[in-house]
Image (cartoon, grey):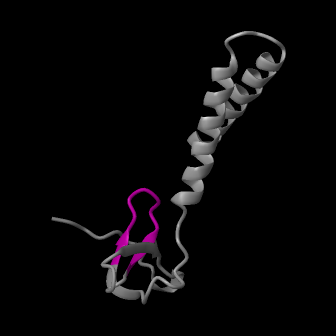
Amino acid sequence: MLRAALLVVALVLLAVGLGTTLGGVAGTFPMALWGAVLLLAVLFERWRYRARAAAGEGPWEETTERYIDPETGMAMRVLYNPRTGERRYQPAPAEAARSDPPTGA
Protein backbone atom coordinates (compact mmCIF):
# COMPACT_ATOMS: atom_id res chain seq x y z
CA MET A 1 0.00 0.00 0.00
CA LEU A 2 2.75 2.45 0.95
CA ARG A 3 4.81 1.39 -2.07
CA ALA A 4 1.90 2.05 -4.40
CA ALA A 5 1.29 5.46 -2.85
CA LEU A 6 4.97 6.38 -3.25
CA LEU A 7 4.90 5.28 -6.88
CA VAL A 8 1.83 7.46 -7.53
CA VAL A 9 3.43 10.47 -5.82
CA ALA A 10 6.66 9.95 -7.76
CA LEU A 11 4.85 9.70 -11.08
CA VAL A 12 2.75 12.79 -10.36
CA LEU A 13 5.84 14.80 -9.37
CA LEU A 14 7.67 13.64 -12.45
CA ALA A 15 4.77 14.35 -14.82
CA VAL A 16 3.92 17.77 -13.36
CA GLY A 17 7.57 18.76 -13.13
CA LEU A 18 8.32 17.76 -16.72
CA GLY A 19 5.09 19.25 -18.02
CA THR A 20 5.61 22.60 -16.38
CA THR A 21 9.30 22.70 -17.27
CA LEU A 22 8.55 21.97 -20.92
CA GLY A 23 5.70 24.48 -20.76
CA GLY A 24 8.15 27.21 -19.87
CA VAL A 25 7.41 27.65 -16.15
CA ALA A 26 10.65 28.60 -14.45
CA GLY A 27 11.89 26.78 -11.36
CA THR A 28 9.88 23.55 -11.72
CA PHE A 29 12.69 21.27 -12.89
CA PRO A 30 13.58 20.23 -9.30
CA MET A 31 10.05 18.81 -8.96
CA ALA A 32 10.70 16.53 -11.94
CA LEU A 33 14.11 15.64 -10.56
CA TRP A 34 12.72 14.66 -7.15
CA GLY A 35 9.96 12.66 -8.83
CA ALA A 36 12.54 10.74 -10.83
CA VAL A 37 14.70 10.15 -7.74
CA LEU A 38 11.73 8.86 -5.74
CA LEU A 39 10.57 6.64 -8.61
CA LEU A 40 14.03 5.11 -9.03
CA ALA A 41 14.44 4.64 -5.28
CA VAL A 42 11.15 2.76 -4.94
CA LEU A 43 11.89 0.57 -7.97
CA PHE A 44 15.50 -0.05 -6.87
CA GLU A 45 14.36 -1.00 -3.36
CA ARG A 46 12.01 -3.60 -4.80
CA TRP A 47 14.78 -5.09 -6.95
CA ARG A 48 17.55 -4.88 -4.37
CA TYR A 49 15.75 -6.31 -1.36
CA ARG A 50 13.50 -8.88 -3.01
CA ALA A 51 13.52 -12.37 -1.54
CA ARG A 52 16.39 -14.40 -2.88
CA ALA A 53 15.70 -17.74 -4.47
CA ALA A 54 16.64 -20.71 -2.31
CA ALA A 55 18.69 -22.21 -5.14
CA GLY A 56 22.40 -21.63 -4.77
CA GLU A 57 22.21 -20.36 -1.20
CA GLY A 58 23.18 -23.62 0.37
CA PRO A 59 21.27 -26.34 2.16
CA TRP A 60 18.18 -25.43 4.18
CA GLU A 61 17.32 -27.78 7.04
CA GLU A 62 13.90 -27.90 8.58
CA THR A 63 13.95 -27.58 12.36
CA THR A 64 11.43 -29.02 14.78
CA GLU A 65 10.28 -25.53 15.73
CA ARG A 66 6.62 -24.70 15.02
CA TYR A 67 4.56 -21.77 16.18
CA ILE A 68 1.38 -19.90 15.41
CA ASP A 69 2.04 -16.49 13.85
CA PRO A 70 0.14 -13.99 16.04
CA GLU A 71 -0.54 -11.64 13.09
CA THR A 72 -1.97 -14.17 10.63
CA GLY A 73 -2.92 -17.07 12.90
CA MET A 74 -1.09 -19.44 10.53
CA ALA A 75 1.08 -22.31 11.67
CA MET A 76 4.71 -21.61 10.76
CA ARG A 77 7.81 -23.79 10.44
CA VAL A 78 11.43 -22.73 10.78
CA LEU A 79 14.15 -23.49 8.24
CA TYR A 80 17.82 -23.09 9.11
CA ASN A 81 20.86 -22.66 6.87
CA PRO A 82 23.87 -24.02 8.79
CA ARG A 83 26.32 -22.41 6.36
CA THR A 84 25.11 -18.83 6.95
CA GLY A 85 23.16 -19.15 10.21
CA GLU A 86 20.11 -17.60 8.53
CA ARG A 87 16.63 -18.64 9.61
CA ARG A 88 13.49 -18.54 7.46
CA TYR A 89 9.91 -18.78 8.52
CA GLN A 90 7.45 -20.43 6.16
CA PRO A 91 3.85 -21.59 6.46
CA ALA A 92 3.73 -25.15 7.73
CA PRO A 93 2.04 -27.77 5.58
CA ALA A 94 -1.68 -28.05 6.33
CA GLU A 95 -1.50 -31.61 7.63
CA ALA A 96 1.23 -30.70 10.13
CA ALA A 97 -0.46 -27.52 11.35
CA ARG A 98 -1.93 -27.46 14.82
CA SER A 99 -5.17 -25.57 15.31
CA ASP A 100 -4.53 -24.63 18.93
CA PRO A 101 -2.02 -21.89 19.71
CA PRO A 102 0.75 -22.70 22.17
CA THR A 103 -0.01 -21.78 25.74
CA GLY A 104 2.50 -19.79 27.70
CA ALA A 105 3.09 -19.36 31.39
Residue 34 % position (x, y): 61, 29
Viewport quadrant of the C terminus? bottom left
- Res. 21 visible in picture: yes
**69 lies above or below 97:** above
The magenta stretch spans which residues? 66-79
Q: Is residue 10 above or below residue 63?
A: above
Viewer-proximal residue among 28 and 56? 28
26 with respect to 66 (left or right):
right
- Seen from this angle, which residue lies furthest left? 105
Residue in the picture at 32% in, 86% down? 82
* Horizontal side of residue 105 vs 57, given as left or right: left
77 drawn magenta: yes
**Residue at left 81%, top 12%?**
24
- Residue 35 vs 56, above or below: the answer is above
Q: Is residue 6 something that shows in the picture?
A: no
**Residue 70 vertical placement versus 99 (above, below):** above
